[in-house]
Image (cartoon, rainbow, N blue to C red):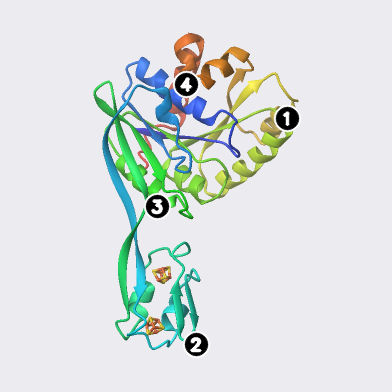
């Protein structure tokens, strides 16, 4: 089994287009594959497939509740909280949990010697499982609106995806912060999708630096090739980064994608190119069985 994350330094470069079309190409070539949409703030991979929801698991977190009757305002819970999630003003007997900052670590509960803290469950989001052609093939991390970090929901989705499928394709959250890192760490290989424009180039460099730091093998797909300039190509050559594939700019691709179509279904050359690309990645980096 091989887990491949599809990522990009910023949204709108074609990350989900690549992830959904690779998944389609694998299925079309009779390889068992699963697609996990880890873009929990705005998941949209299921829109491209005719799927049925079969399961929806709530992802929640324990958050402290402080009793003002039992609290002595000693401040120990505040001192033990690494996330500044407890606000306390002892002289005026004010103590409050800032739920958005709380990571549910439980340290404050252990710290309190006056049994003033209990816990409640707060919902962070859901992990949805979808059937495609009779098999659970799509998993979706979807965080609730207003939740500060999608990381817990992404972790739950990644856990749910551990199956016997030959390939697990992870549609990563954009950017280079914790949600991206969490997804990349779970993968055996990362495909970075970029465009030959100055904005994308700058984001690509940040993604590359992050992946180097976590020591994760990766390669690059240039989407909308033919637009912009050649800076990205010079950079890839200089840094000895593998250019996995180029998708030529084609207005028809943009039109098909914007109407929720799997482009490789119409443009079969893409199905063949993506499948061959994955086979090549598998030969070079496969079978590492990353269990994260
Ligand atoms: S540790 Fe307990 S008693 Fe002390 S301030 Fe926190 S809740 Fe109140
Ligand atoms: S559970 Fe952890 S993060 Fe949340 S308030 Fe308590 S110590 Fe802070």
For marks 4 and 2, the one nearer the N-term is 2
The reply to whether dot 3 and dot 2 touch (C-beta < 8 Å) is: no
Assess whether mark 3 and mark 1 are in contact (beta carbons under 8 angstroms): no
Can residue 291 be seen by looking at this rendering?
Answer: no
For disc 4, the neighbor class at 10 Å (few under 14, some 14 to 19, many from 20) is: some
User: Would you place residue 21 above or below residue 292 in this image?
Assistant: above
C-alpha separation, residue under disc 4 versus residue under disc 2:
57 Å
Residue 20, numbered circle: none
Disc assigned to residue 234: 1
> Which SS class for mark 1?
helix
Q: CA distance from mark 3 to mark 2?
A: 35 Å
Q: Position of residue 223 (x, y in %)?
A: 61, 24
Q: Does mark 4 have its CB less than 8 Å from ligand 2?
A: no
> CA–CA distance between discs 1 and 2?
62 Å
Q: Which residue is mark 3?
A: 152
The quarter of the displayed image where residue 243 is located: top right
Q: Secondary structure at mark 2?
A: helix
Q: Earlier in the sequence, mark 1 or mark 4?
A: 1
Disc 2 under 8 Å from ligand 1? The reply is no
Residue at the disc numbered 4: 260
Kindly indicate whether the residue at mark 2 contacts the one at mark 1 (C-beta within 8 angstroms): no
Q: Residue 18 placed where, x, y %?
A: 50, 25
Between disc 3 and disc 2, the foreground one is 2
Judge the density around disc 1: few (<14), some (14-19), many (≥20) Cα neighbours within 10 Å. few
């Amino acid at each position: 089994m091989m887990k491949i994350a599809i990522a990009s330094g910023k949204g709108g470069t074609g990350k989900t287009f690549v992830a959904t079309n690779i998944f389609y190409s694998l299925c079309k070539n009779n390889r068992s594959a699963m697609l996990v949409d880890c873009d929990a703030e705005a998941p949209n991979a299921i829109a491209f497939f005719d799927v049925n929801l079969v399961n929806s698991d709530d992802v929640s977190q324990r958050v402290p509740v402080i009793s003002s009757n039992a609290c002595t305002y000693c401040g120990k819970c505040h001192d033990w909280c690494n996330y500044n999630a407890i606000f306390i003003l002892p002289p005026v007997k004010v103590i409050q949990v800032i739920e958005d900052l709380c990571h549910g670590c439980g340290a404050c509960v252990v710290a309190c010697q006056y049994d003033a803290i209990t816990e409640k469950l707060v919902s962070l989001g859901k992990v949805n499982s979808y059937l495609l052609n009779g098999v659970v093939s799509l998993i979706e991390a979807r965080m609730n609106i207003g939740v500060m970090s999608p990381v817990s929901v992404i972790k739950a989705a990644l856990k749910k995806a551990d199956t016997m499928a030959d390939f697990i394709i992870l549609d990563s959250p954009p950017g280079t912060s914790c949600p991206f890192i969490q997804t990349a760490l779970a993968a055996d290989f990362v495909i970075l999708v970029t465009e030959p424009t100055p904005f994308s180039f700058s984001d690509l460099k940040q993604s590359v630096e992050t992946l180097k730091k976590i020591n994760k093998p990766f390669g690059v797909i240039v989407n909308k090739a033919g637009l912009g300039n050649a800076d990205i190509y010079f950079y890839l050559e200089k840094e000895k980064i593998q250019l996995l594939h180029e998708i030529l700019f084609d207005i028809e691709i943009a039109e098909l994608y914007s109407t929720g179509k799997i482009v490789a279904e119409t443009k079969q050359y893409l199905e063949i190119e993506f499948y061959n690309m994955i086979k090549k990645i598998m030969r070079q980096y496969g079978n590492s069985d990353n269990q994260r």
